[in-house]
Image (spheres, rainbow, N blue to C red):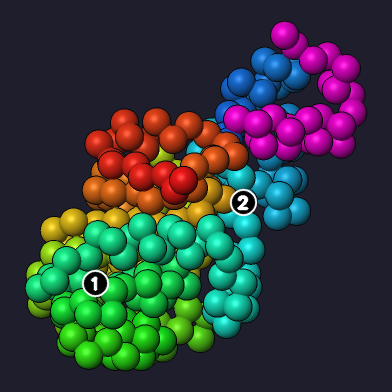
Amino acid sequence: MQDHSATELPHLRRQKILLILERDGKVMASGLSQHFAVSEDTIRRDLSELAAAGLVQRVHGGALPRPKDTGKDYFTRISETDEVKTRLAQLAAERVEDGQTVMFDSGTTTLQIARSLPLDIRITAVTASPMTAITLSEYKGVKVILAGGQLNPATLSASGHETLRLLEGIKADLLFTGVCAIHPEVGISSLHFDEVPVKQAMLDSASHVIAVTTADKLGAVEPFVVAPCSRLHTLITERHVASGNIEDYRGWGIEVVQAV
């Protein structure tokens, strides 16, 4: 059904676009044009205005939701670790087996996974995150390899040539990849440009890749694309997903595990 009432009220139309985006997890200019009985150029201007206000993420042909709380610093995000993230980390830690070489990407969720490992676990752990390396060093049976390089103060993780050279020389059994945003069509994306090659090197070096994320990062997109969803083997997330369809990820052949 077309909504002609919003044709001459741009601010009202934009509010309705936000409501549709919240409901559907994605909007396309062509569909909105038909819905509101206005031109696609008008809708594109609406989406550009919403993007400039930080309310949506523009993509080719439409828009996606903005991820939540991506601007918070690392230590703030650590202090906000909640029951849901802890449960997701516990489910992820159960996938680790003795004798494996395991890569831990940067991020507070992967740090929580490191904290959730069994006390008697015996693995070789590889990470570019000093905070995660310190946590892993507390396990007597864990050999820690820390990739050095230039430290990003926003992520507290190393990047650069030296980091990549070390990661590319390791073949890991398992990777816990950090996720800023993941969308079934766009793939995994990051807020930080210098993270992209590091994440890509880790993906190339691991036999099995697990992404662990809260539901708010599903269906979201950040500026720098890391890899398509097909690079993931397992996705661990919440049971209740606010937007989009979890089956879209299973359609890529991903094992999706939802916390109880």
Q: Does the rendering let one see residue 201?
A: no
Percent x, y of residue 161: 25, 83
Residue 80 shown left or right of residue 156 in the figure: right
Please give the label number shown on residue 103: 1
- Whichever of callouts 1 and 2 sits on the residue coming sooner in the sequence is 2
* Residue positioned 88% across, 17% down in the render: 5
123 over 12 or under it: above or below: below
Q: Does the rendering let one see residue 23?
A: yes
Crowding around mark 1 (Cα neighbors within 10 Å: few <14, some 14 to 19, many 20+) is many
* Residue positioned 29% across, 90% down in the render: 137
Q: Nearer the viewer, residue 213 or 56?
A: 213
Q: Nearer the viewer, residue 134 or 130?
A: 134
Amino acid type shown at disc 1: Met
Q: Quadrant of residue 173?
A: bottom left
Please give the label number shown on residue 249: none
Q: Secondary structure at mark 1?
A: strand
Whether pointer 1 and pointer 2 mark residues with C-beta atoms closer than 8 Å, the reply is no
Residue extent of the magenta highlight: 1-24
Percent x, y of residue 88: 43, 58
Q: According to the image, label 2 marks what residue?
A: 66
Residue 9: within the magenta? yes
Residue 130 shown left or right of residue 1 in the figure: left
Instruction: Tell us which disc is closer to us: 1 or 2.
Output: 1
* Residue positioned 24% across, 72% down in the render: 103
The Cα atoms of the two marked residues, 1 and 2, are separated by 28 Å
Q: Quadrant of the N terminus?
A: top right
Residue 119 shown left or right of residue 60 in the figure: left
Percent x, y of residue 227: 31, 53
* Residue positioned 16% across, 79% down in the render: 122
